[in-house]
Every structure is written in structure tokens, then in C-alpha cells.
Image: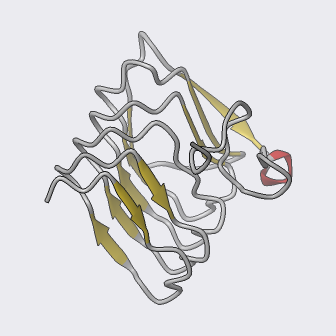
């Protein structure tokens, strides 16, 4: 579809999302608390926030442009596929998390465990999880 921007904000019953193979640069998932699986491979996403996706268990965000991923608030996360993200430097996972699959480019990115209470909130409450920029401001 070559979608470049998508707001699925507030869809609190949506459980599986397949947005792979588009040209997404922005994706707003605020209020999507029931998402269990998120397929985002082969897009142009630079910023993602999963803070409100409390049911999240599976994320495939391979081949994007993300620099940081923060899953410290996602206690059910078990599967992460994040290879082919050359800008990805930091992945935060919840303290004590037990991932069945955690795939990332180990020569580029580092995984840290952190408590959900230290989640970085950007722009006075727009939970983008990246300390430098809110992607919805252009």
C-alpha cells in the first residue's frame, strides 16, 4: 500500500497488526492496549513507542530505521525480531524478562534491562520513548 503514516490510536480491542512492507515513517499506537502481535518489518519507522501496548507479546520490526526500542513497560513481551536496523543502538527490556526469541544485530545494538518506572516520556506526556524527538511534529 506504500502507507507512510498511520494512526491506529485508541483502538483498544485490536489484537494483531500487520503493517509490514509499507513505507511507514510514523505509527501512533497510543491507547492500543490489547495488541498482542505487531508486524512492522520493511518500513521506514524511526520512532516507536509501546508504552500503552500492555498486552504486547510479539514484535517484528526488522528492516526499519529505529534507534531505540523500549519494552520496559511490556511485561508479556517474549518475541522480538529487530535485525537489519542499522541505527538501532539501544534496546530496553523489562527487568527479569524472559524472551523466547530476542533477535537484533549484536554488533550494533546493546540490550539493557530496566524497570518500567524509568520509561522515558517525551514532550510532556507524548510517550514516544525517544529522548530527542516527537515524530508527530514536523
Q: Residue at x 52, y 66 (%)?
A: 29
Q: Is residue 81 left or right of residue 31?
A: left
Residue 8: image quadrant is bottom left
Q: Residue at x 51, y 58 (%)?
A: 77
Q: Residue 34 at x, y = what percent?
A: 51, 81
Outermost residue, front side: 138
Q: Residue 120 at x, y = what percent?
A: 78, 44
Q: Residue 12 at x, y = what percent?
A: 53, 86
Q: Is residue 63 left or right of residue 125?
A: left
Outermost residue, bottom side: 13
Whether 99 is drawn above or below 58: the answer is above
Q: Is residue 97 left or right of residue 105?
A: right
Query: Closer to the camera, 125 or 85?
Result: 125
Q: Residue at x 63, y 62 (%)?
A: 75
Q: Residue at x 45, y 57 (%)?
A: 27
Q: Is residue 125 left or right of residue 76?
A: right
Whether 106 is drawn above or below 72: the answer is above
Q: Residue 6 at x, y = what percent?
A: 38, 63
Residue 91: image quadrant is top right
Query: Closer to the camera, 71 or 12?
Result: 12
Which image quadrant: the C terminus?
A: top right
Amino acid at each position: 500500500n506504500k502507507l507512510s503514516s498511520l494512526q491506529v490510536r485508541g483502538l483498544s480491542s485490536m489484537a494483531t497488526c500487520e503493517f509490514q512492507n509499507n513505507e511507514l515513517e510514523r505509527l501512533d499506537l497510543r491507547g492500543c492496549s490489547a495488541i498482542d502481535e505487531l508486524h512492522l518489518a520493511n518500513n521506514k519507522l524511526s520512532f516507536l513507542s509501546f508504552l500503552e501496548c500492555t498486552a504486547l507479546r510479539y514484535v517484528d520490526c526488522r528492516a526499519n530505521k529505529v534507534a531505540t526500542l523500549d519494552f520496559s513497560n511490556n511485561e508479556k513481551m517474549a518475541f522480538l525480531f529487530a535485525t537489519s536496523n542499522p541505527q538501532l543502538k539501544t534496546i530496553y527490556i523489562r527487568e527479569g524478562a524472559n524472551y523466547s526469541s530476542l533477535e537484533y544485530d549484536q554488533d550494533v545494538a546493546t540490550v539493557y534491562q530496566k524497570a518500567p518506572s524509568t520509561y522515558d516520556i517525551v514532550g510532556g506526556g507524548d510517550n514516544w520513548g525517544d529522548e530527542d524527538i516527537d515524530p508527530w511534529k514536523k
